[in-house]
Image: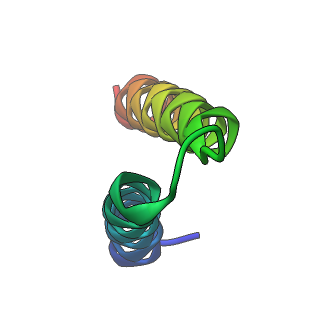
Amino acid sequence: MTPRDRDRTRVRLEEVLAEMETLDRHLLEPLTLEPAITHIEMTIGVYEGLETDVEDLTRVADD
């Protein structure tokens, strides 16, 4: 996966998160998308960690 592909994936995850948050605000109680929102936030966090790991490995390989 190229850096550009990773950027697109991360951007799309954040777009989906924003859409889910917008939808959640329009739902009547007790309905909520909070579990899905939390899952997407966790996915973004893990994805960012993977990006850092790949960057670190690339730097080590270049040295």
Residue at position x 68%, y 34% in the image: 35
Give coordinates of residue 20: x percent, y percent. 46, 61
Residue at position x 45%, y 76% in the image: 5
Of residue 42 and residue 58, the one placed in the foreground of this image is 42
With respect to residue 17, does 50 lie above or below?
A: above
With respect to residue 32, does 1 lie above or below?
A: below
Q: Residue furthest front?
A: 29
With respect to residue 5, does 63 lie above or below?
A: above
Give coordinates of residue 10: x percent, y percent. 40, 59
Residue at position x 45%, y 39% in the image: 51
Of residue 48 and residue 38, the one placed in the foreground of this image is 38
How many numbered circles does the render carry?
0
Q: Quadrant of residue 29?
A: top right
Q: Quadrant of the N terminus?
A: bottom right
Give coordinates of residue 16: x percent, y percent. 45, 68
Colour convention of the picture: rainbow
Q: Quadrant of residue 17?
A: bottom left
Q: Quadrant of the C terminus?
A: top left
Residue at position x 49%, y 25% in the image: 49
- Tell me if 42 is positioned left or right of 8 in this view: right
